[in-house]
Image (tube, rainbow, N blue to C red):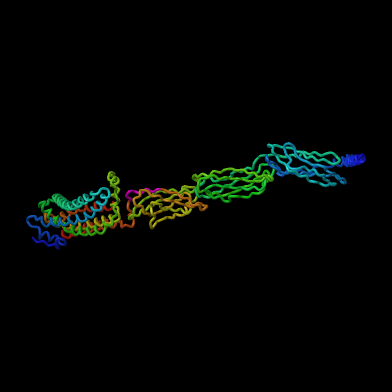
Amino acid sequence: MKTLYLFVISVAVLLAGIGSASAYTTPDSLAAAGNVYISGVTYDPGAFFTGDKGTVSISVTNGNRNQSVVVDHATFGDDDIRLMGDPYDVASNIGPLQTRDYTFSVAADVPDGHYYPRLSLSYRDAGSLYYPAAVWVDNTPLVLAVIDSPDSYTDGKKNTISLQIANPRKAAVKNAVLDIYGANADILPASTYIGSLPAGTNTLVNFSVTPNAETTLNVTLRYDNGDNHHSVSRQIPIQFSPDKKDATPIVSNLEVKNTGGVFKVTGDITNAGLSTANAVTVTSLSPAEPADPYRSYVIGALKPDDFGSFTVTFNAQNQTEVPLRVSFKDNDGNIIASTQNVTLPRFAAQDKSGSGSSLLPQAVGILALIVFAGGWVVYIRKHKE
Amino acid sequence: MKFSLFDLLFNPNRFFQDTLGDTEHLKMPVLIVLAGAILSAGYGYLAGSLTAKLMDSAMGGLGAVMTIFVIFATFAGVFIFWLVWAGLFYLISKLFKGEGSFNRCLEVVGYGYLPQVFGAVITLIAALEYLPKVVVPQLTSSALQDPTVITEATKALMQDPAMMAYTQTAAVISVVFLLWSANTWIFGLKQARKLSMRDAAICVGAPVLVFIIYVIATMAGA
């Protein structure tokens, strides 16, 4: 038994001797450790939002020409920038003039600011290396700005809106996607892939919107900061109002006639707007029933300040008012229509054109009178002689 | 007394020389004017029916009253015009020292009405052709309270294409046949009032001319 105790103690002493001999610090090993330096630090993402998770890769270079260094332990982080996962606990060798990367997963649960979490390397035989790797926590979102939009929106008219997407952050974002949604509106494109957006840069995205009713567009920009998903949204109200530059057909000089039970409305349309009104068309609406020969009347294009005359015919029994529809196409082909009520006189003046109204009866009367008077003058003179 | 219809129409000088006796005979002139009045009442009835339609849509029964009134007015109007023409010729001929009684004037004017009887026949035919085509505006009973509405409705009725065609046709017929009558009246008045041909022509021509100018002016303004 006594012999067994002596054996165990001997082995323990031997192992302890071996251990102390392997961790032994020498002037050479210290000099070699002094030539090890941090050659690069890379954070992904380059700037964190509060709550983001990411990685930091630190490149450690052995500057010695003929001597390796052994790293027993490597870890990273502090109270602000938390290390997620395990540190490097297994010894690793960095050969002469070699570089080894140490990558750590970290999380930033701190407010905006600059932070300096530390890399800690423990050499086997030459103490440790500490290195503060600066990182930014920046909660500035991407900018989503409307830089061009129509002065007004009109029902059914296609308009283009320009958005600027800017990245004021200190690092790039990636996988940026712009989504636009609005009820009662046709949007094209409804989704646009932008991709990466480097720091301090911007890009333009144009989309068309054709509202069928007043609505609100919800614009959402989704992007990834590292592997963290983020988004920024804004709303664009779409409210109808007269277009200041649009064509404005004005109906005037209206005249209503009754031609054998069919009403005939004539008038002028003047374009009081600033754009050309194409394919200007006039027709009557219910309760009137369009009738031949002018069920509809196409005036054609009216430039600003131009005017054109029209004639429409319709039946409207027992009506005192009838709506006229004036429509035109804008330069994009959108049909813009307006209605104007025409008051029908209780007893519309009859249309005399083509009804035989002429000076013929008067001419016949005058001729008969002249023949009669002339005949009598001749007759009296003759009998005088 | 000799009565020749042909002479009355185409040789009135001979007609009045043969027909006019010492005393006035108004029976035949009255019959001629009566014929003209009956025919006038005929197209008065047709025209009155349109007014009746206009009024009946607003108030039932009013149309019948209107029709009766128009028939009576056109019938009586012919007799009134007979008296008026005779009166005018009598007064104007006085300026030319015409002799003879007013009844004599009535007699010759009555005979001279015969061409207008034929004119009335043609006018009646025109009325039968045109007036049924007239579109009559519809009035409501409340519209009767508004004089503007009635004016507008009447204007619309008068400006109906068929109504205008009838009005113009009737006016031309009346002018032509009035001139024919005037021709007859000149010879009649010469005999009745013992005037020269020139004076008789002036006595008849002046008022007829004024009347015809009025008719033509009315046509132009319609």
Over which residues does the magenta segment extend?
Answer: A341-348
Query: Residue pushed farthest left?
Result: B22
Q: Quadrant of residue A79?
A: top right
Work out whether residue B206 can be spotted: no
Image quarter (top left, top right, bottom left or bottom right) of the N terminus of chain A: top right
Q: Please name the residue shown 53% across and 47% down the image.
A: A183
Using the image as rendered, state which of residue A224 and residue A329 is in the foreground.
A224
Q: Is residue A324 left or right of residue B75?
A: right
Work out whether residue B41 can be spotted: yes
Using the image as rendered, state which of residue A113 and residue B173 is in the foreground.
A113
Query: Residue pushed farthest right?
Result: A3
Q: Quadrant of residue B164?
A: bottom left
Using the image as rendered, state which of residue B35 and residue A204 is in the foreground.
A204
Q: Quadrant of residue A103?
A: top right
Residue A242 position in % (x across, y down): 49, 45
> What's the magenta bit mostly, secondary-structure-wise?
loop
Q: Does residue A206 show up magenta in the picture?
A: no
Q: Is residue A231 left or right of residue B179?
A: right
Residue B157 position in % (x across, y down): 28, 52
In the displayed structure, A367 sits above or below A205; it is: below
Residue A364 position in % (x across, y down): 26, 58
Q: Is residue A14 left or right of residue A352?
A: right
Image quarter (top left, top right, bottom left or bottom right) of the C terminus of chain A: bottom left
Query: Residue pushed farthest front?
Result: A1
Q: Does residue A343 show up magenta in the picture?
A: yes
Q: Please name the residue shown 25% across and 59% down the image.
A: B129
- Give the total number of marks visible in the rendering: 0
Q: Please name the residue shown 33% across and 48% down the image.
A: A346
Residue B66 position in % (x across, y down): 22, 50
